[in-house]
Image (cartoon, helix red, strand yellow):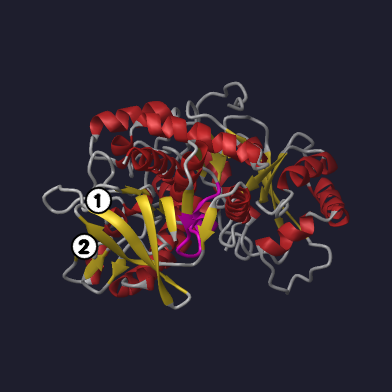
Amino acid sequence: MVTDQGADGATATRAMADFLETRWRGVRHVFWGSQLRQAQVTAGLHLELFNVDRQLRFQGDDPQRAGVLKVPVAVEAVAQP
Amino acid sequence: VKCDIAVVGSGLAALVATRALQRAGRDPVLIWPGLSSLYFLYATVDVLGYANATTPEPVEQPLNGIQKLIADDPEHPYALAGSAALQEGSSLLLEWLREAGFNWRGTLARNLLLPTATGTPKPSCLVPASMVAGDLQRNEPIAFCGFDGYQDFTPELAASNLSRAWTGGRRTVTAVRVPVPGIKPDRLFTSIDLARNFEDATFRREIAGRLRRAVSDDKARLGMPAVLGLTHDTDVHAEFEKETGHPVFEIPTLPPSVLGLRLFDRLRRHIQESGVEMIWAAPAHAAEVSNGRCLRIHLKSAGRDQPVEARAFVLALEDAVDGAGRAGTHTIRDPFFHQALAHHATPEERTDESLFQPQPFATIGYHVSDRLQPVDEDGRPLASNVFVAGGAIAGYDPTGIKARGGMAIATGYRAAQEAMAA
């Protein structure tokens, strides 16, 4: 969407989330055996690798009104322990 | 097989437990039930990203955050393991990573804030050195770099999201794409293909040249999908920074995750080369208990039953792909004691209606004693010499608080200490 249709990131992320949510509602009735494991991996990928739950929280329902993250002030480089 | 202490699992909890036993002079055997979840979910070691599953405010100081979490919720797996186990286990892991040839950074005192592949800032604690330049607490502009035809990283999406989140549009975040030499854009190729190619100096210099021309801002740091070398990543990253003339940071991608592969393959090989015996691809199907002690566990190995006898057992199952639980349509049972870990009238009760909310299935697992022994309904240990670590502990849900690595380290380390004392 961002590359083909020139949508902004928040709109594209919301569209991806809506797609994933719809699919989730369709498949959550069959979560046993290996399907349950697959569900755990799917949730882990989007929430842990991408942090999409926080992206959605932070951009809100209206992509045009997305907020700005409070980033802590820069500190010295991280020391190797 | 007869051994001193048997560790069952293939995730970080199992590796940390095995390493802790080895370093303490014990003789562990590592039983590997199947493909590791490291491949899928580990890129960094996240210790505590958020104080709870819903707050948008990241945790700045993970160790302090965990001490508060332990005080507030004495049933949390971090509380069961104790913050000392996290501290000692993390030191053990960092020392091991160095010995195994990794270059990792970070301390429990402070989180880094790194952009994910969707351009979302995410707090992480211990990370490969090749990711550090992405820290959003630094001010230099960022250029996300993608490749024509490579579908697992969209630089434009990352740039648009990060630009808004990080700066409200004030700092410069851009996106560039370059063609990959030798690969036609209509061919499907993965992170592994790219990572292998990046070990070739000619290929790498060609890409570096294309990026130098594409990125106009001399001060920009380059955010790349994590494909900078499959096995010689430390050298490849350093060379590539010189060749592009920019600081470069890697960003974890969808499976196949090169960061996960590097971590898992090298640690597994290292622990084997340092003398730990491994039993491969053998799922456990029963524990033999007598007079309150587990005498042996039974594995299904090459189609036959293989008993493993040990003085103590660490069940360090990651639960996502290791099969900690056998999930039927209504009941989820554990593979060792055949206890019902959860009952559901319908399978939908295992999940939330939304994928982006905490999932009930994540918290299913063994209830454990204060020594991490699995217990029955009355709180009595099922076997006094069995200890649980990782995702197989009830109430263990690292997803929302972004704590998968830290929870695995803390419980793995603590279970190993208890197994030695058993």
Q: What residue is at 46 percent from the left and 35 percent from the top? A: B89
State the image coordinates of residue B128 (x, y, percent, origin top left): 62, 41
Q: What residue is at 42 percent from the left and 76 percent from the top? A: B304
User: Which residue, given by chain and number where applicable, does mark 2 sit on?
Assistant: B339
Q: What residue is at 48 percent from the left and 37 percent from the top? A: A68
Asked if the residue under mark 2 is in contact with the one under mark 1, i.e. CB atoms within 8 Å, the reply is yes
Furthest toward the top, the residue is A76
Foreground residue among B21 and B362: B21
Foreground residue among B366 and A26: B366
Q: What residue is at 47 percent from the left and 48 percent from the top? A: B28
User: What's under tag 2, amino acid-wise?
Assistant: Gln
User: What's under tag 1, amino acid-wise?
Assistant: Pro
State the image coordinates of residue B102 (x, y, percent, origin top left): 65, 41
State the image coordinates of residue B404 (x, y, percent, origin top left): 43, 46
Vertical position of residue B209 compared to residue B333: above or below: above
State the image coordinates of residue B93 (x, y, percent, origin top left): 53, 38
Residue A77 visible in rendering:
yes
User: Which residue, given by chain and number where applicable, does mark 1 sit on?
Assistant: B374
> Which region is colored magenta?
B30-43
**10 Å neighbourhood of mark 2: few (<14), some, or many (≥20)?**
some
Vertical position of residue B305 compared to residue B27: above or below: below
Q: Quadrant of the N terminus of chain B?
A: bottom left
Foreground residue among B393 and A53: B393
In magenta stretch: residue B160: no
Q: Tag 2, which chain?
A: B
Q: Secondary structure at mark 2?
A: loop
